[in-house]
Amino acid sequence: MSPRRSAAAAAATRAAVLDEAVELASREGLEGVSIGDLAAQMGMSKAGVVGPFGSKEALQLAALARASEIFRREVWERAAGREPGLPRLRAICEAWISYLERDVFPGGCFLTQTGAEFDGRPGPVRDALLETSKLWQAVLRREAQTARRRDELPADSDPAQVAFELEAVAQGVNTARQLRGDPRAGARGRAAMRRVLGLPKGTRL
Amino acid sequence: MSPRRSAAAAAATRAAVLDEAVELASREGLEGVSIGDLAAQMGMSKAGVVGPFGSKEALQLAALARASEIFRREVWERAAGREPGLPRLRAICEAWISYLERDVFPGGCFLTQTGAEFDGRPGPVRDALLETSKLWQAVLRREAQTARRRDELPADSDPAQVAFELEAVAQGVNTARQLRGDPRAGARGRAAMRRVLGLPKGTRL
DNA sequence: CCTACCGATCGGTAGG
DNA sequence: CCTACCGATCGGTAGG
């Protein structure tokens, strides 16, 4: 009862194109990746690359969805098993820094890259990025809220402020690493996130 | 003894092209601004736009130099008159947030935008951005060092870590503002920078 | 998923 | 600083 061979093959091609697009876009940006580049890189024709999606914009949206899926797997899912509140928040932070250190996307965080690229370009890609960004802020805020309710964070701490600061640190790590090539970027990010979460200096994330 | 009229006019044209390029690039990225777009926007011919620079890459480098000059004027020079150490660091932070809130570049911080765009694109533009980034980190680090020496920061604080965290916060403000349109972005950035500098909660930057 | 092709636009230049 | 033009590449499509 497996799908027809041609359908399975089409799905595999689609996935391969997306993986390549996500990788290239993390280095060059989503707009900077041309269909011709992509085709050349994969030894395919341009029609073969764009066909499964219909247009470059549709390909961009699919690449963004794929990248969000990878981010979710590498950061959220590694922490989702932990107790809600501070334990989970710490696990998210550790997974987030690790994701940046391991260069899960070779050109650095796909969402940071394309967020900067599209924040001034209205359209469906920007809308999707905004949605992803708001969703992730909401996840962080919710865990900070839980942590505060459980007295794992000070009673006067602001969950939205915690979410804002954690994202800021992650962006700082990405820049320090990808632009300046700073080998201490990850360590600096961990130290900064510990401070945001009010953890004592010696503590591990 | 003024320069020949044609030379002055040429300089004025050059400056006008750069201002337009910097503005467009803060929205669309440096690579995204085509010579044709720029010419159309200014009611000039493509030859007139690219002529003063010789090539698009030379124009990009000149635009980056112009943007660095504006950043320096809006952030560094507003604080340079203050006492070295914590007073100057606080003034830098306030000017930095203000610069982001006033949308000095209409698409957000030019250096954040192009830094993300070029961190994965080797070449002269990336090299220049790296230089600018390292220079600004050195400025922040030096002020933090002075502040520590004067006991305005804890003896065990790390000046490079302070510089890292301040840049992270500025990037966080830029994203919160330009992508999410968060009206509290500036306030959140000030609060975060106050924490980085160890200032009590009520204090102004 | 390929070949072959479309009109539009790219960066850049010759000549004035 | 303009017109007019260059070859190359862009996103996209027809037909198989």
Image (cartoon, coloured by chain):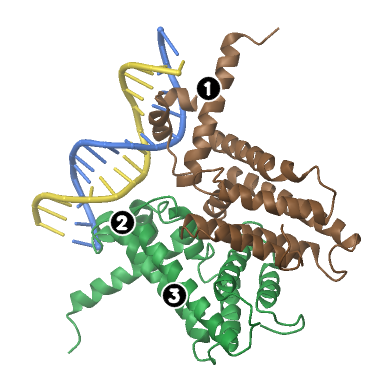
Chain colours: A green, B brown, C blue, D yellow
Along the viewing direction, whichever of B68 and B150 lies nearer the viewer: B150
Q: Tell me if A26 is positioned left or right of A180 in this view.
A: left
Q: Residues within 10 Å of mark 3 (few under 14, many from 20)?
A: some
Q: Residues within 10 Å of mark 2 (few under 14, many from 20)?
A: some
Instruction: Determine the residue positioned at 68% across, 45% down.
Output: B75
* Whole-percent x, y for residue A160 in the image: 54, 72
Query: What is the quadrant of the C terminus of chain B in the image?
Result: bottom right
Q: Residues within 10 Å of mark 1 (few under 14, many from 20)?
A: some
Measured in 3D between alpha carbons, the distance from the residue under mark 2 to the one under mark 1, in whole angstroms, is 36 Å
Q: Quadrant of residue D5?
A: top left
Chain of the residue under label 3: A
Chain of the residue under label 1: B
Q: Determine which of the numbered discs, if any, sits on residue A70 in the image.
A: 3
Query: Looking at the image, is B121 positioned above or below residue A132?
Result: above
Ranked by sequence position, the earlier of labels 2 and 3 is: 2
Q: Which residue is mark 1?
A: B13
Tag 2–tag 1 contact (CB < 8 Å):
no
Query: Looking at the image, is B55 positioned above or below residue A93?
Result: above
